[in-house]
Image (cartoon, rainbow, N blue to C red):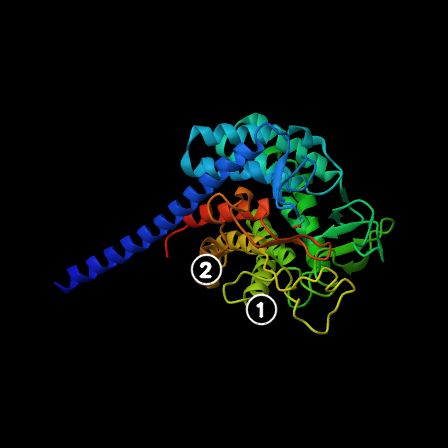
């Protein structure tokens, strides 16, 4: 009798858990489909890509050379993956194939984002070999920005720091970790070790120069173009040179989780876990685990020149950093044996809070999914707005949650 009761209870618990999970997933993907259908009508027939909301409240589109151009296609692929609906597939193909000219693009490092979120998902879900060839050519283009002297891929061409005070001849940003996935893909498809060597060398150099002892990250590291030596560190989108920009920390968590997946080298797992622990255990992380745009905005000892220039409260959340982190933590939980439950729980908490408190009302938010993100506070650009990449990592996190074992 007792045995039957226990078995029934366990079955009921399992059923409830599964039901709750499947209701959550269904609800969020239904909402994503409604919003994205409206977005498709809003941008129909324009060779431009949704990015955010402009200052006048209108939908802001970009050309294909912007670093965010591949995310919308990626969103369409996640909708196709979930629904298996031919209409989503045709839209995903259309928005992916328009990016083909980028395969020879060499002007900045973001080709990994642009091509792997679009063509990478396209190839993963269709196995169309034409997409594979385009990805390999893109990886070759990205590799041209690697210099063995510095041991990393140059993120941006020469520019002054955002406040004009310093010159950066070989700036590398923490975000660049994300572009390495394209190189690992090209290595696996071609067997050419050059792609893998570049990716690993970049990850090692970044581990050496972009992290503080507590595994918080600097945003920008600048190298000497002649000797390749490390020169200086700073920020472009963070609060100060010494602070930790929330999205940069999220890129580090995601980037090193992915590099561990591709290399199985424990030092990269340690970097991913330590960066994740900095985020999750940070005293400035709000209870809902959606960070302010920089972990140090409340630090009275830091006060950058631009402070209060735009008379806005500094206490704005960046839901994009949270979406990236949630997706990364679902994967990291698979590798971090002793912290599996901890990371899975944190990934779920972030995802549930995004869904409950940060998704838009249907038909609002210019038909993006997620509200309350920050592009760049110091530039007074994209403050408290939707961002297409927040939507992308939200959909990816939902997909990873769906495919994970229910807890
Ligand atoms: N990769 C640019 C950004 O995260 O804003």
Residue labelled with disc 1: 282
Outermost residue to the right: 226
Local secondary structure at mark 2: helix
The single residue placed furthest to the left in the displayed view is 1
Q: Quadrant of residue 162?
A: bottom right
Image coordinates for residue 174, horizontal then vertical, percent: 68, 53
Q: How many marks?
A: 2
Residue at the image position 38 percent from the left and 45 percent from the top: 26
SS category of the residue bearing label 1: loop
Task: Say which residue appears at 44% left-offset and 28% top-offset.
Answer: 86
Comes first in the chain, label 1 or label 2: 1
The C terminus: image quadrant: bottom left
Q: Position of residue 120 (x, y in %)?
A: 57, 36
Name the spot of residue 379 as percent of width and height, x first: 73, 54
The answer to whether residue 128 is above or below residue 212 is above
- Specify few, some or many for label 1: CA neighbours under 10 Å numbering under 14, 14-19, or 20 or more: few
Left or right of 16? Residue 275 is right
Is residue 123 among what the camera can see?
Answer: no
Q: Residue at x 73, y 70 (%)?
A: 302
Q: Which residue is mark 2?
A: 349
Which numbered marker is on residue 22?
none
Q: Residues within 10 Å of mark 2 (few under 14, many from 20)?
A: some
Q: Is 112 left or right of 303, judged from the image as shown?
A: left
């Amino acid at each position: 009798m007792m045995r039957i009761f226990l078995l029934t209870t366990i079955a009921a618990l399992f059923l409830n858990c599964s039901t709750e999970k499947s209701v959550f997933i269904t609800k969020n993907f239904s909402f994503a489909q409604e919003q994205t259908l409206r977005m498709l009508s809003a941008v129909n027939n324009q060779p431009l890509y949704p990015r955010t909301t402009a200052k006048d409240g209108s939908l802001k589109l970009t050309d294909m050379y912007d670093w965010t151009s591949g995310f919308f296609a990626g969103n369409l692929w996640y909708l196709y993956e979930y629904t298996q609906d031919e209409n989503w597939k045709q839209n995903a193909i259309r928005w992916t194939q328009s990016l083909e000219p980028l395969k020879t693009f060499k002007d900045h490092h973001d080709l990994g984002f642009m091509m792997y979120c679009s063509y990478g998902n396209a190839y993963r879900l269709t196995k169309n070999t034409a997409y594979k060839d385009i990805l390999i050519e893109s990886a070759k283009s990205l590799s041209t920005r690697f210099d063995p002297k510095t041991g990393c891929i140059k993120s941006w061409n020469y520019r002054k720091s955002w406040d004009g005070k310093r010159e950066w001849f070989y700036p590398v940003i923490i975000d660049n970790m994300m572009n390495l996935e394209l190189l690992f893909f090209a290595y696996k498809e071609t067997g050419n070790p050059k792609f893998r060597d570049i990716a690993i060398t970049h990850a090692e150099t970044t581990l050496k120069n972009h992290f503080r002892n507590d595994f918080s990250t600097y945003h920008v590291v600048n190298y000497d173009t002649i000797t390749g030596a490390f020169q200086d560190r700073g920020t472009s989108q963070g609060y100060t040179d010494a602070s930790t920009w929330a999205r940069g920390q999220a890129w580090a968590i995601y980037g090193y989780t992915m590099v561990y997946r591709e290399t199985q080298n424990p030092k990269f797992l340690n970097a991913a876990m330590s960066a994740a622990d900095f985020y999750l255990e940070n005293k400035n992380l709000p209870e809902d685990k959606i960070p302010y745009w920089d972990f140090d905005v409340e630090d009275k000892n830091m006060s950058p020149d631009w402070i209060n220039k735009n008379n806005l409260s500094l206490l704005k959340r960046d839901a994009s950093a949270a979406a990236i982190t949630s997706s990364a933590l679902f994967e990291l939980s698979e590798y971090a044996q002793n912290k599996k439950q901890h990371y899975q729980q944190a990934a779920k908490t972030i995802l549930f809070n995004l869904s409950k408190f940060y998704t838009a009302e249907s038909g609002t938010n210019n038909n993006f999914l997620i509200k309350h993100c920050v592009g760049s506070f110091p530039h007074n650009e994209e403050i408290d707005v939707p961002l297409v990449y927040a939507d992308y990592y939200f959909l990816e996190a939902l997909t990873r949650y769906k495919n994970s074992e229910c807890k």
